[in-house]
Every structure is written in structure tokens, then in C-alpha cells.
Image: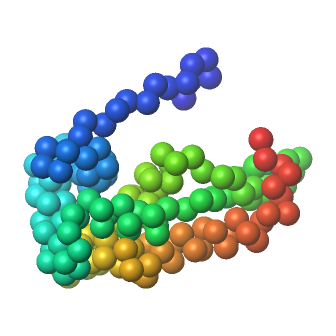
Amino acid sequence: MSRRHRAVKRQVEPDIRYKSPLVAHLVNVIMKSGKKNLAQRIVYGAFEKVSEKLEKGDPVDLLLGALENARPRLEVKSRRVGGATYQVPIEISFERQESLALRWIVDAASGRKGIPMKEALAAEIIDAYNNTGNVVKKKEDTHKMAQANRAFAHLRW
């Protein structure tokens, strides 16, 4: 990471089918080894399954609802002061909140063994939308950790 200049944020091109940068970001998170076509098939298949199961309309809106429930507001970062290392709670920018939530959803979906990724991703999106599941638990654990270490908030930099 450069100390002189801040890296310029690149805009993600909107998705082809849903015209949403958020869906394009999800595709990029799922993509491995440059296989974007496969990642798109997984995401689109998951969206179809989510639409079938919830019957609430646009899957992008459902993804937004799931992200709203999965986004962490705080996290802890290690800070070394003297000889001790403290876990300092910090607030997270919106972009990082979104990235973490998407990454957690994809990780939780890939952790579900025995079912295809389309179905696992759909199940995780539905769970996050309903405020249940591994992703919401991870968010709550992150918040608990930040809450437990709020005594060290004065060490924020």
C-alpha cells in the first residue's frame, strides 16, 4: 500500500441482466480464477431460487434487504501500544460494510456442503433477509467483540 497517495476507487460496471453494480460486485466476489461466466450463472440461478421461494418480487431488492441485515457497523482492529496489543473497536465505512457482508454471504454459502452453490447462495440470501443464519450470527459476534472492547476506543487512530 502506498503511503503517498490514496488508491483511487474504481467503479464496478453494472451487471448485464439486473443493471446493478451490487450484483456485479457479488459476481466478482464469487468468481474464482477469472471464471466470470460461471459466477454469473451461480448468481442468476440463486436469484431465481430466491424469487421462487420468497415471491416478493425483484431479487436485487431482496439482496439489498439481506445485506442490510448482514452489514456490520463496527469491527475491531489490533493496535499495539507499548508491549500490549489491544483490540480497538472502529466504525466501518459503507463500502467496507457492503464488501464484508457480501464476502460473509459467499463464504457461508460455500461452507454449506452437499448442495450446489446456487442453492446454497439462495439459502444464505434468504436467511440473511430473514435475519437468521450464519451471516447474521457473524455480524452479531463482530458487534459483541467491539462492544466488549469499547474500553479501548480511546486508542483509536
Where is residue 51, by image quadrant? bottom left
Q: Considering depth in this image, is 25 or 61 the residue closer to the camera?
A: 61
Residue 109 lies, in percent from the top left, at 30, 71
- Residue 20 in view in this figure: yes
Left or right position of 34 against 103? left
Where is residue 42, by image quadrant? bottom left
Toward the top, the furthest residue is 4
Q: Is residue 150 above or below residue 82?
A: below
Q: Is residue 143 above or below residue 27?
A: below
Toward the front, the furthest residue is 57
Left or right position of 117 against 97? left
Residue at 57% x, 19% y is 5
Picture colour scheme: rainbow
What quarter of the picture does the C terminus occupy? top right
Q: How many numbered dots are placed on residues in this image?
A: 0
Residue 145 lies, in percent from the top left, at 68, 69
Where is residue 150, by image quadrant? bottom right
Residue 14 lies, in percent from the top left, at 23, 40
Toward the right, the furthest residue is 82
- Residue 134 in view in this figure: no
Residue at 14% x, 60% y is 44
Residue at 55% x, 62% y is 72
What quarter of the picture does the N terminus occupy? top right
Q: Considering depth in this image, is 114 or 28 the residue closer to the camera?
A: 28
